[in-house]
Amino acid sequence: MEKNFDWFKEKTVYQIWPRSFCDGNGDGIGDIPGIISKLPYLHELGIELIWLSPVYKSPMDDMGYDIADYFTIDPLFGCNEDMYQLIREAREYNIEIMMDLVVNHTSDQHLWFQEACKSRHNPYRNYYIWHDPVDGKAPTDQRSFFLPSSWTYHEATGQYYYHAFSNRQPDLNWDNPKILEEVYKIMNFWLAKGVAGFRMDVIELIGKITLEAKFTSSKVHDLLQKIFRHTLEKREKTITVGETGGATVKDAILYSGKHNELDMVFGFEHLTVDEEAGKGKWAIKNLDFIKFKQILAQWQTGLYKKGWNSLYLSNHDQPRQVSRFIDPQHRVAGAKMLANTLHMLQGTPYVYQGEEIGMTNFNFTSPAQFKDIEMLNFYKEFITHPEWGKERVMTAINAKGRDNARTPMQWSSDIHGGFSTVNPWIEINPNYLQINVASDRASPDSIFNFYCHVIGLRK
Ligand code: TEU
Ligand code: CA
């Protein structure tokens, strides 16, 4: 079989964050039957690939990016049969599904971690990263993405375990060859069920050198080549995209240029132009448009004939692009300008749910409205911080908080925006009365009709 590396190059990917896309069973939470009911909509938009954020069993500490069972769909989203039906029915619309592979860490509810915590000699102990206390404290002063420390002390066995994210997302120990075997099984299971490929969550971090944690090494390329050979290589048409927050153009060429690791990666460089260098997402500053254009150009020229680009401005971790890049009074024209800019570049474009109708950030006024662990922890830790305080924290959250992108999809001006028949799990943006699919569909000059046009043009 000759592997086809080009089959996806005229296609556009639509990212669905399932909890907020469409509620099919009236419990206020998006689900797979809801997604199935919207396949005709995605077909009308011209979509031919879906990146589906995690739908596996999870305690939802990080909204599904903390997986407790990689082979079972969480009952909140439906059952395995629903997933197989989605794969089948999507194909009838010439749409393939990419699932989200989250294997830098598991949930602390995963069987492996439950076993690992039973004793230092449990066979699953070194599926994770454990260290003795150093001078009675955590082994390093490494911060995690969501907490002041990346280490949590486990009383019962007297050691710390490492977690790059929440303490309920223990990192897997990729120095243990058994982890590769487990990941082959997970990927081959879903590939056999008919998924076309995967978006790979924080995949650069599996190359971390323990203790420095965030520092990545060439190890990630060696691991990805092994994964490619044991799962994707023998299949004619697959697609993968790696989430590589720290990647440069050079890294992107290594990941995507030799057709033996990934097809493309998500870089973040172009999305750091509104934060103070090296200070992280919450240290907001005026967006530097010149730098934004330069970075897009560098990735275009740098990857030309050497690798492949992903093209995105939005996802479930980023604020709504029209609120980030455009003055409110120019929302419609601005949304079209961003779409035109992105879709006329070389690479694979990603449309995040709601972007195609110009959905905006929410205006949070109280932490009672927050659902995202990153926002809740940031608020809790920094409102008492001498340099921050409540006002600066709320300004940063309204600019960059992930829940801005996680409010219910606005389908119509009906109650709850047509997302559900009951109160959604998270507040809907009150502007759903004006900004929704139904009204955009009805007006020829709408953002939605522009997206249909620009996606069609590429094809
Ligand atoms: O995101 C990884 C990542 O880079 C984020 O921590 C990002 O830097 C941050 O959210 C910016 O606000 C992936 C998933 O996309 C994210 O939803 C998960 O929370 C995270 O990994 C852990 O799985
Ligand atoms: Ca539901």
Image (tube, helix red, strand yellow):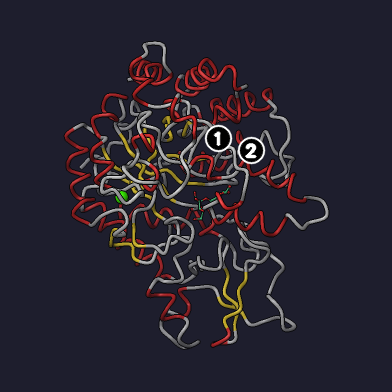
The residue drawn where x is 25% and y is 51% is 191
Q: Residues within 10 Å of mark 1 (few under 14, many from 20)?
A: many
The residue drawn where x is 42% and y is 71% is 109
**Precedes in sequence: disc 2 or disc 1:** 1
The residue drawn where x is 72% and y is 43% is 283
**Can residue 98 be seen by looking at this rendering?**
yes
Q: Residues within 10 Å of mark 2 (few under 14, many from 20)?
A: many
| Of residues 432 and 386, the one drawn nearer to the viewer in this rendering | 432
Amino acid at the residue labelled 1 = Asn
Q: Secondary structure at mark 2?
A: helix
| Of residues 146 and 37, the one drawn nearer to the viewer in this rendering | 37
The x and y percentages for residue 261 are 41, 48
The residue drawn where x is 51% and y is 43% is 254
Work out which residue is located at the far top of the displayed protein and give it: 444
- Relative placement, left or right, of 275 versus 97 is right
Q: Quadrant of the C terminus?
A: top left
Q: Quadrant of the N terminus?
A: top left
**Can residue 232 be seen by looking at this rendering?**
no
- How far apart are the alpha carbons under marks 2 and 1? 8 Å
The x and y percentages for residue 178 are 39, 71
Amino acid at the residue labelled 2 = Ala
The quarter of the displayed image where residue 268 is located: top right
Q: Which residue is mark 2?
A: 399
Q: Secondary structure at mark 1?
A: loop
Q: Which residue is mark 1?
A: 361
- Relative placement, left or right, of 89 versus 392 is left
- Label pair 2/1, CB-CB below 8 angstroms: yes
The x and y percentages for residue 180 are 39, 64
The x and y percentages for residue 353 are 41, 35
